[in-house]
Image (cartoon, rainbow, N blue to C red):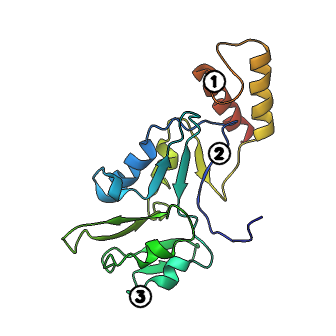
Amino acid sequence: MSTEVYGPHIVQYPPDYSLCAGCTTCEIVCSLSHDGVVGPQYNRIFLMRHEPSMIHEVLSCQHCVNPPCLDACQDGAMSLSKSGVVVVNELVCTGCMRCVKACAFSPPRINMVRSRSKETRGARKCDLCSGRADGPACIQWCPVKCLGMSDGPRPEYEAIHAAFMGAESAGAGAVETGETRDPDILGELIVAGEEASK
């Protein structure tokens, strides 16, 4: 069992609650809200597709309490906020990639914009949409509501699973055990989860 300690971060709910559709909405709204453009090198959150299982993963910075990326940065571009969020000052970052190499995760949760322009070159990573009134854009705009905050309210997984199994035993739609399920049932589970978390 890992003994690492993390600050507030984006979490992906288990597929029993909501199955990631692999739609890349999280990546798109992330780069749009930060840089006003869409492109893989601007992502601060990453979608890792798994086929043929279709159980996709959403990866983002875990905001380590003792961040190795912060220790590796020699330009003073990285800092740890009072709320425990590891932040990159993109105006100071030189794009040396020391933080990427130091990241404790594989693949690294830090993106690097490669550009000849010093204004755009440098590291990009999740900052939980710091300063955004509605919080992280990926959570707000995920169409299947499979993302949340690590320190936020969690869905009642057992209740959701029981509702799913009950619908399945009743022969509702084309629900199957495992990796595929009827979209209408999935929508009902999301609503049930929201009601359970109130």
Q: Mark 2 sits on what residue?
A: 13
**Residue 86 placed where, x, y %?**
51, 73
Circles 3 and 1, Cβ within 8 Å, touching? The answer is no
| Residue at image coords 57%, 71% | 104
The reply, left or right, for residue 90 in relation to residue 169 is left
For marks 1 and 2, give the one nearer the viewer. Answer: 1
Q: Residues within 10 Å of mark 2 (few under 14, many from 20)?
A: some
| Residue at image coords 57%, 77% | 67
Label 3 secondary element: loop
Label 2 secondary element: loop
Q: Is residue 54 above or below residue 108?
A: above
Q: Mark 1 sits on what residue?
A: 181
Considering only order in the chain, which callout, 2 or 1, is on the residue closer to the N terminus? Answer: 2
The reply, left or right, for residue 110 in relation to residue 91 is right
Circles 1 and 2, Cβ within 8 Å, touching? The answer is no
Measured Cα–Cα span from mark 3 to mark 1: 49 Å
Tag 1: amino acid: Arg
| Residue at image coords 75%, 19% | 167
Considering only order in the chain, which callout, 3 or 2, is on the residue closer to the N terminus? Answer: 2
Measured Cα–Cα span from mark 1 to mark 2: 16 Å
Q: Is residue 31 above or below residue 22?
A: below
- Quarter of the image where one finds residue 44: bottom left
